[in-house]
Amino acid sequence: MEKNINPAGASSSATRAADRKTIERNRRNQMKELYSQLCSLLPPRQTTREPMSLPDQLDAAAKYIKKLQTNVVRMKERKDSLVARNSGHVHRRNGGGDGGGVNRRLPRVEVRVFGSALEVVLVTESDSSPSVFHEMIRGIEEEGGEVVNASFSVAEDLVFHTIHSKVGDGNGAGCGATVGKISARLKKFIEEYE
């Protein structure tokens, strides 16, 4: 008895097998690329230069992620502690016998000098007008400083503005007098604002 061979059926099953192989090869290549990306995010190993096996790479990645999560929690706690401590210094209770209100002593400015770089930290209340911040920038520029970067962050009801500027010719020459003028102008503005 002769078997009837269907060439069309054989070719369709061969096509399906080839498709499955192609799909599996693409999946393996994609996984290899993802493992490579994951490994590139890990800190360099200092103990050995031997390549890590895939399970070791995944284990190292899991440990590193847990370490980063622990660091984030610890840093958040530290930030909260610093904000609470700073708020304690900024918010001072009036010592009067009537149980008086809160004397905020804000806005407050601090000027730091690093060679020809100047950092101005301005602390204001979150509901205060942005004009204080703009006046700080204007004062820096009118006294000869060049604002390079300005940013802010909010913690509870306080806004911490940070202004980085360049003073002088970049090598520190002639910037002492300019820094003095900028610092005096900013502090005078804050005193008048209160």
Image (cartoon, rainbow, N blue to C red):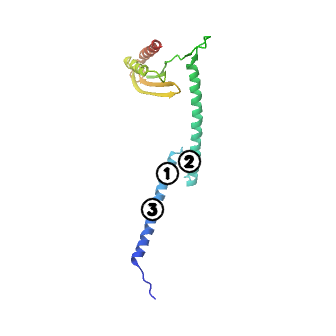
Question: Would residue 73 be found to the left or right of residue 148 on screen?
Answer: right
Judging depth in this view, the residue of 88 and 110 nearest the camera is 88
Residue at numbered disc 3: 23
Identify which amino acid the numbered label 3 is placed on: Ile
Using a 10 Å C-alpha cutoff, classify the residue at mark 2 as few (fewer than 14 neighbours), some (14 to 19) or many (20 or more). Answer: some
Task: Give the vertical position of 54 relative to 120 (above or below).
Answer: below
Question: Of helix, strand and loop, which one carries label 1?
Answer: helix
Q: Are marks 3 and 2 in contact (CB under 8 Å)?
A: no
Above or below 10: residue 175: above
Q: Which residue is mark 2?
A: 61
| Residue 111 shown left or right of residue 97 in the figure | left
Q: Residue furthest top?
A: 97
Residue count near mark 1 (Cα–Cα under 10 Å), binned few <14, some 14–19, many ≥20 = few
Give 128 or 180, whichever is nearer the viewer.
Answer: 128
> Can residue 46 be seen?
no
Asked which quadrant contains residue 178, the reply is top left
Identify residue type, mark 2.
Answer: Ala
Residue at horizontal 43%, vertical 67%?
Answer: 18
Residue that sits furthest to the right in the current view:
97
Residue 135 x/y as whole percent = 41, 19
The residue under label 1 is: 36
User: What residue is at 58 percent from the left and 52 percent from the top?
Assistant: 56
Who is closer to the viewer here, 189 or 40?
189
How far separated are the C-alphas under marks 1 and 3?
20 Å
